[in-house]
Image: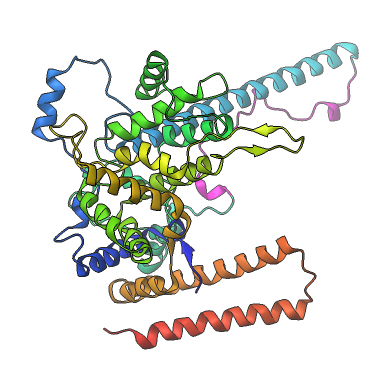
Amino acid sequence: MQPVSLHSLSELERASLQELALYQLQEKLLVGDLSLAKVGPKGSKSIRRKLESFSKEKKDYSPQTFGIPLFQVIANDRAYKQLQETVKSSRRQCLEVEATVTNFRAQMQKRSQLGRSCWLVPCEIFPEEPLSPAFPDHRSSWSQRRGAMSVDSIADLSDNSSKLLEALQLSHPHELDPRRSLGKKKMLSLNPITWQVPRIVDRCCKHIETYGLQTVGIFRVGSSKKRVQQLREEFDHGLDVFLDEHQSVHDVAALLKEFLRDMSDSLIPRELYAAFLSTASMEVPAQLAVLQLLLFVLPPCHSDTLHRLLRFLSKVAQHAKSSWGPDGQEIPGNKMTVSNLATVFGPNILQKEKPGEKDSGAKDFEDSSAIILVVQRLIEHYQTLFMVSPEMQHDILRRLFQTDPDVIDYLLRRKFHTVLSTESEDLTEEHAPTPLSGQALESNSVSSEFYSSISFLNLDIDI
């Protein structure tokens, strides 16, 4: 096996990886008696927060983006996307109906003109035509679409096949609300889950990547509070906010920082605050190993959002120094090194207390230095930190062999086909004119190597 990205794992594998990482952290005495339920999303409001909400100025809307749990932000984005798709589908159907009516009118007009021009018209010219337009049937079942299967045919399958088809469906963030799954055992997907990054984070990052990488002092220069507040309210109302060249880079940068700062559940859960800070005193190899385990413990929505943010910050840091263009003209750097970015974003990513709580802003110098160092390591090594080693993949499969042996065959086949597709893509990119026999030999070598790892998995397993 080769190292794979965390996101390429199936939902079932990621859940197993969370448990393995938590176990290894507990063995190192870094997290103590911590459960994944504490790290995961919180579904209910505390009494204190409810009382605070009553004391604040009453709003005529509930926030869709700011100050709410991350999984709820993603769920709101998903609901908005589904609404947009429904509206587009309705408009498309209206256009189809309009086109059908227009076509029918044109045919009837042509027929009437032809009838008036000649009294004796052969019957063949007037074939049997409908007296009303034939509207497209949008109620057609999914079984009539390519690659789909009807409900009746699923019911005819065996129980094992039905469960497999159900398990293979792509999953979504907590199915909008974790409270829906109370009393029910959640069916985990055997496919990679969808990226769970809030719309506001992705759009702010893309805007700055497009328009602000050369902006000096990005994230440090002041912004317009009025414009930032306007953007914030638009996101909070659930509007589809487009960030283009008309928005100030500094306003968008301030908006991103505000979103991270005001999250009700910190991007790195507060239950892991002490564990992350404890890595600051470790040597770099040991520090990276522990940080990787801590990242594996994060809920998928927090892990994916953190990955997107770190990738963005790494790109900003690459433009910190001035460079020279092809015409010899100097391109100014933004002067935001990894250390500067860690200083700005560290307190927003690693929070000990919730925003507004007592002593939430009172961090001693030791904690501040540790936060900067840890976030700096995350930015510098994010690519390797979110990769899963072959050894850890073997551990995941061994664990699943004990808990869910029926899914092992499917997971191994998917990994095998992923390896083959990756190899073929590499050959295509290199444009290497390899003979057919050589390709077959390479495929066979990959197959033998992969199935030897399967044998290793089965032989070394301890039940």
Q: Which residues are magenta?
A: 120-145
- Residue 240 in view in this figure: no
Where 82 falls versus 224 (above or below)?
below
Q: Position of residue 208 (x, y in %)?
A: 52, 32
Q: Position of residue 76 (x, y in %)?
A: 35, 33
Farthest residue, direction top:
116
Where 412 falls versus 234 (above or below)?
below
Where 239 falls versus 374 (above or below)?
above
Residue sitting at x 18%, y 51%: 38
Q: Main secondary structure of the magenta part?
A: loop
122 drawn magenta:
yes
The quadrant of the image that shows the C terminus is bottom left
Q: Position of residue 81 (x, y in %)?
A: 45, 33
Q: Is residue 188 left or right of residue 358?
A: right
82 drawn magenta:
no
Q: Is residue 426 left or right of residue 174?
A: right
Residue sitting at x 44%, y 22%: 251
Q: Nearer the viewer, residue 53 or 102?
A: 53
Q: How many marks?
A: 0
